[in-house]
Structure formats: C-alpha cells, structure tokens
C-alpha cells in the first residue's frame, strides 16, 4: 500500500527543508539531530517492507508524516516469508528495494541482520527499550505481543476455560474437545513455529501437551484470522498460542470470542525492525526507526495499531506495562532479539522438530 | 501455392534480388513472433530446471550445482503423501467426471429433456468460477458449521458429511470438473447423426440402454480424451485443496509446493523447483497424450456423410429421473457453494446459534472500498480481463498466423512449444516469471556494463531501470497469464483460422497482394468474429485465474485471484467472501454477454 501526501504538503515540506525549523527535533534528542532530519527530508521518501497489516500501520504513517512532513512513506504489506524472499532476491538482483524491514519473523530478521544486510545504527531511543530487544545496534524489537489462548464464549464456560498451559493440556483431553482444538500449522506459520519451539523449552510437560494435541486431533491453520473465524463460528472451541493483538482486536467486536493470558508463563513476540545497509534513503529510515521506538510512536502502536507497546513508560490497554500488571513480570517470557532465535533455521534441527511434532501432535 | 507459402528460408539474391530482399523483409514479423514466443515459453521453464539442480536460490552467492534438492524431497514423507494423494485425486476425478459428463452430454444433446435452454449455461458455471472461490463457498455452506450444515443439523441432529475429508475433496473436485467432459462429449455427439440411436430405440431399448450401449461407445475417443484431460487437471488442482485440505492436512503436489515456501523457515526455491520438475515430468506426457488423442478422436466418425440429422430421443417416464440427476448436480456444484458465498459476504459473523437476520451488513464491501490495494485489485482484474484479454488474443493470433499455411520445421516447433506451458502449473509459472523479471534486467545490465561503449552505457543508464520497473507493473502479470493460457487461446484462434478456405488467400496472392496484405485484408477480416469470441473466453479465463498471480503479487499488480489466496492465508475471511462475490459478479457479466451474442462457449 502506498501513502502519498498531497502535492501541497510536499511543496510546503520543500519550503521548510530549505529553512530548517529546529522545533521539529523531538525534545531530549541531541542537538545534531536536526542534521539527520534535514538529510532525511532531502531524501523525501522511505520504503518499508512489513508484515503488519496496512490498516494497523496507517495511523503510524500518518503521525510520522505529521512529525516530519515531506517524507513520503511507501509501506508494502506482505507476509513475513515474502518480506524475506523479496528483500534477498531484490538485493541480489540490484535495483530498488526496501529501506527498512519490519517483520514478525524474528528469526528471519536476525538472519538477515547477521548476514550483513543491516545498517548498524544506534537509535537515540535505544536506552528506552529493554536490553533484550536490541541486537548489536542493528535489529530492534518494537512491540510486545503475547501468545494467548482463545475460546468460544458461547460453548466453553467456567472450569473449561484454561488458565495455564497445564490446564490447557488437561482440558483438551476431554471428549468434547476432540476435533475442536486449533493452533498454527507450524510448517506454514513462522510465528507459530517459533512459539512452539519456545514452549518445548519453557514448558516442562510439553511432551504431555503434544500427546493431548494428538489425542484431540488438533486442527491446524496457517493464519491467525482463520483460527479466530473457526473459533468464533463454533467449528473449533479453543485455540492455542494465538497472536494476542489480533485476537484482542477481534474479540472487541465479536461477542463469541474470549481471550486468556496464560498465568504460568506468557510468551512474548516482538516485531523486529532493521535498516537496509544499502538503503536508498538511509536517513529517512533512521528517522523512522527512532520514531517507532519513541514514546510518541509507541503510544500510537499501543492505542491505534493495538500491537502492544514495548516501552515500559507507555500506558494503556495494549502495553507491556499492562501485561506486567496482569500476569506479573516474572511470568512474561519475551523471545530475545538475537542469534538464539535462529537456532531452528538449521534445516536438520527444524526437520527433526517438525517430524517429532507430526508424530505426536499431528498424528491422524 | 507452394511458391507463395515457402517458409522463412529465402532464395538468394542475384537476378531475383529485389524479390528476395522484399521477401526477407516480409518474413521479419514472423521471425520476431517466433523468437518472442519461444523466449516467453522457454526462458521461465529453463529457470525452473536450472534452479532445481542448485543447492540454494540461484541468486545466492553460495549456490553450487547439486542434486540435493531432489534428494531432500524424495526423502520427505510429505512429498510421497502428496504424490499419492495427487494420483488418487486425479483418478477419482476421472472416475467421477467422465461418466457423469458423458451422461449429461447425452441428456442435453440427444433427448427431449425439458429446460435444456437454461440448463446449458448453468452447466458451464464451474469452469468459469475460480476453484478458490468454489472451495471457500463449500466451507461456508457445508463446513462443520456452514449455513446449510447448521440447518441439516437442526433437522437431523447430525451432519452426514465432512467437507474437509479427502473423500469429500475428491468428490467435489470430480463434480466441478464434469463440465470439461461434458463439453467434449457433447460436441462429439453433435457431430454424429442420431439414426443408430433411433434404431436401437425402435427395437425396444430404454433411453439408458441407448446411452450406455450405443451413444457413449460411439464417442469413446472423445471420452478418452476428456478422461486424460481431467486426470491431468486433477494433478493441477490447487485452490480447492488449499482451502479444503488445510484443517486435516491433506496435501497434493501443488499445495506441497506452496507449503515449501515456509517449511524450512527460509525460502527453498531449489526444493520448489525440484517439485516442479517432478510435476512437469508427470504432466508433460499427459499433455502429449491429449494431443495424440485429439488427433485420433475423429477416427470413429464413420457416418458423417449422411448429414447429421438429429432427432431428440423421447425420454418418456425417465424424464423425471434425468431431471433429478441434473438438478442434484447443479444444486451441489453451483447453487450450494455460490449461495454460501453470497450469504457470507453480507453477514458480520456466523455459526451455531446466530440468527442471520441480526447480523446482515454491507461492512465488508465498505472495508474493501477503504483499502486502496483491494480497489486496485478489482480495477486490475477488470483491466487484465478486458484489455489484457484483447492483447493476449492479438498475440495468439500473431502466433497462429506465423504457423498458418506454413508447414515447415518452425511451425512444428511452435506447434509443440505452445503446449509446453500447459504442463507447468500456474503457481509455478508465476514464480518463474518473477525470477525472469528480477534477473533478466540485472544480467543484461552486467552484459551492457562489460561492453564499454556509448550505446551500451546509455542503455544501461536509461533502458535497464525501465525494464526493472516492469516487474511491479501489471504487464508482468499479463505476460504470465498469456503464456499460461497459451495452449487454450491458440486452440480458440486456430479453430477460426481453420475455417478460412485456402482458395481465398490464394486468389488474393494471384492478383498480386503481398503476404502482409493478404493477412490484413483477407484472413483477419474473415476470422474477426472468431477473435471476438476468443476475446470473451480469454476474459472469462483471466477473471478466474488465481494461482499464476500468487508470487507476482506486489503493490500495483494486485488481482482478485491472487488477493484471494493471500487474504485467505492471512485469514481475512470477510474480505475473501466479499471479493469472491465481486469476482463471481464479473464472471457472470462476461458469461451474460457471451450468451447474449451467441458466442460458442466451446469448440
């Protein structure tokens, strides 16, 4: 999707670019930040490849443009594999590609950054986000999205609503849930795969959970939307490891969906962003990165994009601060932005996990 | 005639100099057409084969030649499962579609069945509706909590079917492919006189006996051809299995290939290409078999000379049974899925215990309207159907003319070449075209940069960036569509070309018209209506196409078909329903126009 400001706005922006206006540097930024803003305005454009829905990104772009008029943001919405595929093939073929990549496939993002595709840039906001979310001043975690249980409120009630992972394994063993449990198809969904391997590490009874999935003949889907649709219609009763933001947004408008944050531990995924080393508009990309991590940007992420702000100083319903309040700091398990997430990209290891999963949970 | 229709080889200059030079000039158009056609057909295919014997995507620096990709897929149990399922699906398809299609053809062409006028067009609907849309229609109408399943559940207390089971997928695929058989069987029946059947009827055979013992055996070659065709189509089924096979994990080769996009976490183009090569290895012989069968399909036709006098066979009391069979088929294959989609696109949410009247809404259409990419997708779909369809027919005509009355090696080469893309599934053709558009410019650029002269530098400066831009324009998509449907389109055009008697063109040549002039003033005007009909058919096919655009989808090249696959993967079911509804409307308009102007929907 492309957002284009009017010609008038561009003209005004050009006029401003000629005569720098210091007021545009956000409060507390170093004095020389104005140079970056000017350079970015000279570039006038920014291309982002992202795996977040255009609808959720639109308010961010609007606010970014209000802060730094004159920079056209071209946001391209694709799925996370596509972000990776498109970027590496375009980088190899030469020609235009993205300035910034922003994706929920943490492993692929780190792989690209580690592979030398990322521009090292120490964001002025780096100190304001948790240390685990920054890798080598290249890749930054930007959101704080929990994996949740989702259930059908009309058909699942009371004690049948799981509160912990152990509850979940026990509850789906009942005959009522046979053929009615759903989760990501981990062969197709990168996020689903990441959550599941993390569960294998963090949840001591993971073996039992896998068996329970197998006994309930778990139905797998490749996307969050399909899972939510099936749960809402009653075709499935309960969903495992559903990406929180999407579930909460839909549950707001759909009276049949209920959402539970697991009380024993809640996995946290963070959308990772980095700047392309050969970006055509590196300064605009730096500005964008700082903006996304700033309090202003994070407030938009929380309140309008509903993606859960990673900064602790942002408050509201969809923020990390709120999650800490609900399940306690020690029960939140963020996936660390760093090479550890790439562990399962080694084909042998990945295939072994998939094989084992299919032999237990996926058996038909 | 031989002097006029000599192939590209030109006699040397000398005394005949002026004439020879002119002829060489005149043959340029043909040479260009042949070269472009071969490039468009073989370059993507070459890339697929090349990619399949590499160890990594072909643009990565660390790739080496190796057969690892084949080793990997041959060791993957999913591949064999997908292969087995593919075989089952294809055979099931043939077993269901051939008898039913033959029977429908007999009833429609040979009997006095009531309501044939309006049943005819309905029979063809499944051909022109995207399988993606069909599959989705079955989920919302007959899925575990589909609209109709819920009613049945209230009535009977149980739902007697499971739409996600592999059996259901085979049955649905079989039923939706009946029209393909019907088309060939009915045109074969139409070319036969009905006297043999009447003789059988007079000697006391029931309509069913006539059908099984007389009519269908007579059109055996056409049925065999149709059988091979649906078997082949069965191997290509993608959308239906993508939608219906997901919940229980049923795979066929095309969906296995799609799944490989993500299975290893990083893109595995080499694995996908290896699967593609295996797929082509199966489909190519089938395509060649079709060609061979089509050639021999006329060999049983022995009673043509008497003129095809045809008298409808009275069905008598069998009428109601026949009507019930046809009605049942239409209900299951057309009415159920399509009404399901229409309903779904107008409700907010659905399921057990939800009253439909309470949740009616136009919100999904408003949502589409608010997303520029979806609006672009709709506009592009119309453009690629109307303008792209017209351009495609123009190209097909150019290729057909390059083969027209020139029985030489080049024609034979083209004749087989145009069949080749048919064997490559659309999903993969799209992917390979993406590669072509990504890498051909950069190869050309490298070559030009190495040439070190002014023109090359200028080209690399100005022409290459333009070439790069092509990828994100609808041209890329149009080219892929046109190549994928090349064989189909060529058949449409060459059928009308065959109807032009050679003496007309010879007469024009005899009075001194140049070859170009003959084409312009004689041949083209004569096939004008055939081309218009082909345009409409190509429009319908382009509206329905979905898999070719999947990998070519980028801002600017959105079309409804590819958006459906992408939105479905993203889970935006509301939008899928509303877009499907719009897609069906477009197809219905095209079909309406075709019927209004009496375009033959088949040949």
Image: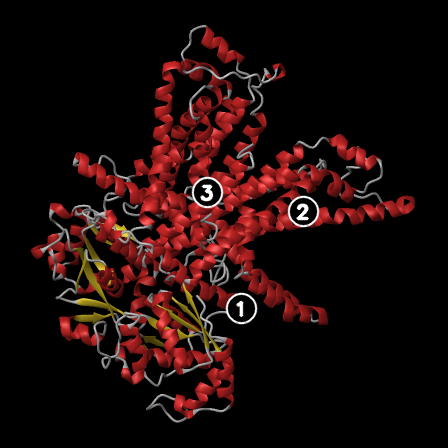
Residue at the limit of the structure toward the front, as seen here? B357
> Around disc 3, counting alpha carbons within 10 Å, would you say few (fewer than 14), some (14 to 19), or many (20 or more)?
some
Q: Position of residue B46 (x, y in %)?
A: 55, 51
Q: For mark 3, give the secondary structure.
A: helix
The mark nearer the N terminus, 2 or 3, is 2
Q: Indicate left or right for A210 with B389 as reference.
A: left
Q: Are marks 2 and 3 on the same chain?
A: yes
Residue bearing mark 2: B34
Residue depicted at x 69% and y 41%: B401
The answer to whether the residue labelled 2 contacts the one labelled 3, judged by CB atoms less than 8 Å apart, is no
Q: Is residue A104 above or below residue A6?
A: above
**Of marks 3 and 1, the one in the foreground:** 3
Q: Nearer the viewer, residue B603 or B402?
A: B603
Residue extending farthest to the top is B203
Q: Is residue A134 above or below residue A82?
A: below
Q: Are marks 3 and 1 in contact (CB under 8 Å)?
A: no
Quadrant location, the C terminus of chain B: top right
Q: Which mark is residue B588?
A: 3
Labels 3 and 1 share a subunit: no
- Residue sticking out furthest to the bottom: A31
Q: What residue is disc 1 on? A: A94
* Residue B245, visible in the rendered structure: no
Q: Which quarter of the figure has residue B104? A: top left
Q: Position of residue B481 (x, y in %)?
A: 53, 49
| Distance (Cα) linking label 2 and label 3 | 36 Å
Gap between marks 2 and 1 measured at Cα? 30 Å
Percent of width and height locating residue B586: 46, 47
- Residue drawn at (17%, 58%), measured in percent from left and top? A206
Which residue of the protein is positioned furthest toward the left in this rendering? A159
Residue B173 picture quarter: top left
Q: Chain of mark 3?
A: B
Q: CA distance from mark 3 to mark 1?
A: 43 Å
């Amino acid at each position: 999707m492309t957002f284009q400001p009017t010609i008038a706005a561009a003209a005004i922006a050009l006029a401003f670019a000629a005569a720098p206006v210091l007021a545009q540097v956000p409060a507390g930024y170093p004095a020389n930040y104005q140079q970056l803003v000017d350079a970015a305005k000279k570039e006038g454009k920014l291309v982002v490849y992202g795996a977040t829905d255009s609808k959720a990104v639109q308010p961010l772009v609007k606010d970014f443009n209000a802060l730094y008029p004159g920079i056209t943001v071209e946001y391209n919405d694709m799925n996370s594999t596509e972000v990776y595929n498109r970027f590496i093939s375009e980088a190899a073929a030469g020609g235009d590609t993205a300035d910034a990549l922003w994706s929920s496939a943490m492993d692929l993002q780190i792989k690209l950054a580690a592979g030398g595709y990322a521009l090292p840039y120490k964001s002025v906001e780096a100190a304001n986000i948790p240390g685990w979310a920054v890798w080598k001043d290249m890749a930054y975690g930007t959101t704080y999205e929990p994996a949740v249980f989702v259930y059908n409120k009309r058909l699942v009630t009371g004690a049948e609503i799981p509160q912990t992972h152990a509850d979940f394994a026990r509850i789906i063993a009942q005959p009522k849930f046979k053929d009615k449990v759903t989760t990501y198809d981990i062969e197709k969904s990168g996020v689903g795969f990441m959550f599941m391997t993390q569960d294998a590490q963090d949840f001591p009874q993971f073996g039992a959970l896998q068996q329970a999935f197998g006994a309930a003949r778990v139905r797998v889907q490749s996307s969050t939307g399909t899972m939510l649709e099936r749960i809402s219609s009653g075709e499935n009763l309960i969903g495992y490891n559903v990406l929180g933001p999407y579930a909460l947004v839909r549950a707001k408008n759909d009276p049949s969906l209920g959402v539970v944050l697991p009380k024993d531990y809640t996995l946290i995924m963070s959308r990772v962003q980095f700047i392309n080393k050969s970006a055509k508009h590196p300064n605009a990309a730096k500005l964008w990165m700082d903006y996304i991590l700033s309090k202003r940007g994070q407030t938009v992420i929380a309140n309008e994009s509903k993606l859960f702000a990673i900064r602790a100083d942002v408050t509201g319903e969809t923020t990390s601060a709120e999650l800490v309040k609900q399940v306690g700091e020690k029960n939140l398990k963020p996936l660390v932005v760093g090479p550890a997430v790439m562990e399962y990209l080694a084909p042998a290891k990945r295939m072994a996990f998939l094989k084992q999963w299919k032999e237990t949970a996926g058996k038909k | 005639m031989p002097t006029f229709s000599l192939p590209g080889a030109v006699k040397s200059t000398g005394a005949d100099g002026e004439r020879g030079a002119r002829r060489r000039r005149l043959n340029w158009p043909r040479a260009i057409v042949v070269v472009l056609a071969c490039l468009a057909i073989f370059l993507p295919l070459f890339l697929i084969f090349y990619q399949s014997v590499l160890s990594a995507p072909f643009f990565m620096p660390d790739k080496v030649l190796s057969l690892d990709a084949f080793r990997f897929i041959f060791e993957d149990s999913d591949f064999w499962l997908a292969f087995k399922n593919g075989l089952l699906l294809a055979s099931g398809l043939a077993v269901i579609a051939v008898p039913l299609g033959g029977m429908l053809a007999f009833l429609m062409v040979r009997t006095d069945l009531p309501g044939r006028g309006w049943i005819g067009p309905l029979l063809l609907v499944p051909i022109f509706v995207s399988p993606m849309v069909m599959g989705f229609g079955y989920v919302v109408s007959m899925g575990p909590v589909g609209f109709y399943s819920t009613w049945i559940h209230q009535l009977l207390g149980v739902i007697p079917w499971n739409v996600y089971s592999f059996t259901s997928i085979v049955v649905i695929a079989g039923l939706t492919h009946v029209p393909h058989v019907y088309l060939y069987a009915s045109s074969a029946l139409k070319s036969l006189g009905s006297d043999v059947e009447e003789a059988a009827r007079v000697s006391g055979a029931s309509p069913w006996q006539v059908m099984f013992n007389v009519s269908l055996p007579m059109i055996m070659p056409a049925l065999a051809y149709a059988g091979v065709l649906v078997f082949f189509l069965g191997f290509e089924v993608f959308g239906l299995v993508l939608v219906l096979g997901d919940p229980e994990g049923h795979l066929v080769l095309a969906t296995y290939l799609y799944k490989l996009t993500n299975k290893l976490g990083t893109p595995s183009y080499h694995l996908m290409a290896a699967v593609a090569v295996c797929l082509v290895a199966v489909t190519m012989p089938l395509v060649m078999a079709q060609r061979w069968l089509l050639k021999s399909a006329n060999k049983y036709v022995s009673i043509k000379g008497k003129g095809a006098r045809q008298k409808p066979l009275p069905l008598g009391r069998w009428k109601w049974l026949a009507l019930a069979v046809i009605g049942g088929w239409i209900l299951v294959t057309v009415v159920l899925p399509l009404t399901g989609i229409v309903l779904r696109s107008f409700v907010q949410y659905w399921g057990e215990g939800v009253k439909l009247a309470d949740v009616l809404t136009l919100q999904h259409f408003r949502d589409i309207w608010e997303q520029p990419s979806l609006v672009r997708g709709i506009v592009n779909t119309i453009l690629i159907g109307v303008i792209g369809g017209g351009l495609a027919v123009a190209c097909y005509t150019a290729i057909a003319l390059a083969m027209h009355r020139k029985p030489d090696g080049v024609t034979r080469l083209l004749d087989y070449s145009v069949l080749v893309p048919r064997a490559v599934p659309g999903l993969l053709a799209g992917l390979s075209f993406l590669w072509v558009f990504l890498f051909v410019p950069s190869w050309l650029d490298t070559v030009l940069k190495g040439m070190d002269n002014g023109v090359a530098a200028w080209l690399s400066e100005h022409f290459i960036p333009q070439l790069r831009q092509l990828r994100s324009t609808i041209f890329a998509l149009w080219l892929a569509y046109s190549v994928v449907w090349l064989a189909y389109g060529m058949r449409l055009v060459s059928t009308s070309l065959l109807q032009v008697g050679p003496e007309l063109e010879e007469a024009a040549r005899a009075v001194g018209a140049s070859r170009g002039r003959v084409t312009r003033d004689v041949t083209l005007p004569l096939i004008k209506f055939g081309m218009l009909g082909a345009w409409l058919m190509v429009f319908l096919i382009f509206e329905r196409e979905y898999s070719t655009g999947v990998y070519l989808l980028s801002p600017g090249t959105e079309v409804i078909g590819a958006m459906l696959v992408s939105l479905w993967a993203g889970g935006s079911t509301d939008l899928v329903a509303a877009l499907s509804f719009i897609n069906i409307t477009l197809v219905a308009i095209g079909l309406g126009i075709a019927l209004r102007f009496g375009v033959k929907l088949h040949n």
